[in-house]
Image (cartoon, helix red, strand yellow):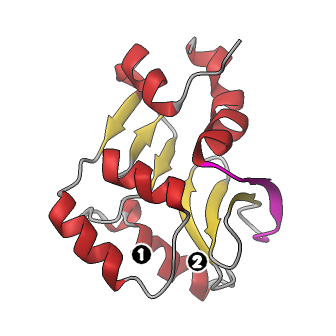
Amino acid sequence: MRTPTIYEDAISRPDLFRWFGIDLTLFEGWLAKLPFRAHPGLVDFWRRTGGGDIFESETLLGPLVVDETDSVLKMNEYHWSKGLPHRLLIFHVGGYVSASSMDRDLLVTLDPDSYRVTGSFDSFTGWYQNALRSEYAARYGV
């Protein structure tokens, strides 16, 4: 049986997914100014949703949000100052953190205290299904 994507879960349980939204013109300008390359699956996710809050306790950071605690760049400035390697771009915070590896085309999960890599995924869908969804699907009935 095929595991649903984040978008399919959001359709079946919209009460668990609150997207920030995105202005695509502003996003494309923001993306062009980035001094690094984010994972293509993450970029596609941002184009579709702008990031958001899911499963009550997890935040998928957004590129153009006003709230600094939801901003991908503001949160990364904080984590880089705490020792996060600059080759990693955190895009998810919650029970643990997840990042795009800028030197490899991977999404990784990290221990929030040491920034040690605890898992790696080739695709955004693989990350969602094997990291967040595997933890929350049974609890929330998705």
Determine if the magenta segment contains residue 28: no
| Residue under the point 70% across and 30% down | 135
User: Which residue is under mark 2?
Assistant: 79
| Mark 2 vs mark 1: in front | 1
Give SS at disc 2: helix
Tell me what residue is drawn at x 39 percent, y 31 percent: 17
**Residue at 66% from the left image edge and 33% from the top image edge:** 129
Residue 63, quarter of the rendered image: bottom left
Question: Which corner quadrant holds the N terminus?
Answer: top right
The stretch of residues the image draws in magenta is: 114-123
Q: Position of residue 100 (x, y in %)?
A: 61, 65
Mark 2 crowd level (few <14, some 14–19, many ≥20, 10 Å Cα): some
Residue receiving disc 1: 73
Figure check: 113 above or below 58: below
Name the quadrant containing residue 132: top right
**In x, y percent, where is residue 43?**
44, 59
Q: Are marks 2 and 1 in contact (CB under 8 Å)?
A: no
Residue 122 magenta: yes
